[in-house]
Image: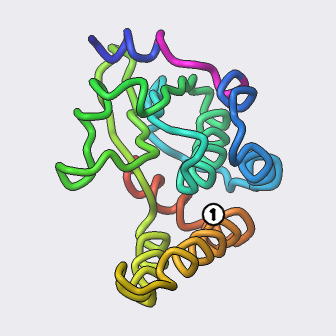
Amino acid sequence: MKLQDWFEKGMTFATYVDSMSVHRKELLHIYNTIELPKLELNIGTRVVVLTADWCGDAMLCVPIIQRMCEQHGVESRFLIRDENLELMDQYLTNGTSRAIPIFIFLNENWEEHAVWGPRSQLVQDFITTERAQLPTKEDPTFEDKQKAMYATFRHKLSTDTTIWNSVIESVTERLS
């Protein structure tokens, strides 16, 4: 399928949010709270987003980049990763991982203009540091400690404006 077909298959932001059952509250908090500076970006004309409502990175990045799109009059459409593996497998992180979200920015000819995702370097560094502190998988406390780590991670993503700004800066750098 062409990128135009994927775009036309996707949900609007409102439909995506209405379909959410996991991180809806946190995503809407970020969406309603974020204050973007006036950004001069070559963002393209449309964006296709591969996402899933269970994903903490999507909870963070989707509302921020949606606001960036709105600021520039760019239409967005959302596709659930596991329902669209044919497209997802064209945008693997490090050539192996179906990490999301992935934002595919399109030009006026429906061609890929830029791709961003799944997270800013600051978020990557934070999660790498947190994971390094976990015990080995064989440790009987691993599962509980991992669950607690991800709860802390989600809370930080949904409340820390430094993290939010790192997404803005990373996307701005990619689109400049």
* Place of residue 75 in the rendered image (x, y in percent of width and height, measured from the top left): 57, 23
Residue plotted at (45% across, 27% down): 48
Q: Is residue 151 left or right of residue 42?
A: right
Out of 88 and 6, give the one closest to the viewer: 88
- The colour scheme is rainbow
Residue plotted at (55% across, 26% down): 76
Q: How many numbered badges does the structure rendering display? A: 1
Q: What residue is shown with label 1?
A: 164
Out of 91 and 85, give the one closest to the viewer: 85
* Place of residue 5 in the rendered image (x, y in percent of width and height, measured from the top left): 37, 9
Q: Residue furthest left?
A: 95
Residue plotted at (67% across, 41% down): 67
Q: Which residues are magenta?
A: 8-14
Q: Which type of secondary structure does the marked residue at label 1 adopt?
A: helix
Magenta-drawn stretch contains 10: yes
* Place of residue 109 in the rendered image (x, y in percent of width and height, measured from the top left): 33, 14
* Place of residue 101 in the rendered image (x, y in percent of width and height, measured from the top left): 46, 45
Crowd tier of the residue under label 1, counting other residues whose Cα lies within 10 Å: few below 14, some 14–19, many 20 or above = many
The quadrant where residue 134 appears: bottom left
Out of 132 and 77, give the one closest to the viewer: 132
Residue plotted at (47% across, 33% down): 49
Looking at the rendered structure, the kind of residue marked 1 is Trp
Q: Is residue 137 left or right of residue 73?
A: left
Q: Is residue 170 left or right of residue 34?
A: left
Quadrant of the rendering where the N terminus is positioned: top left
Is residue 4 depicted above or below 74 in this figure? Answer: above
Magenta-drawn stretch contains 59: no
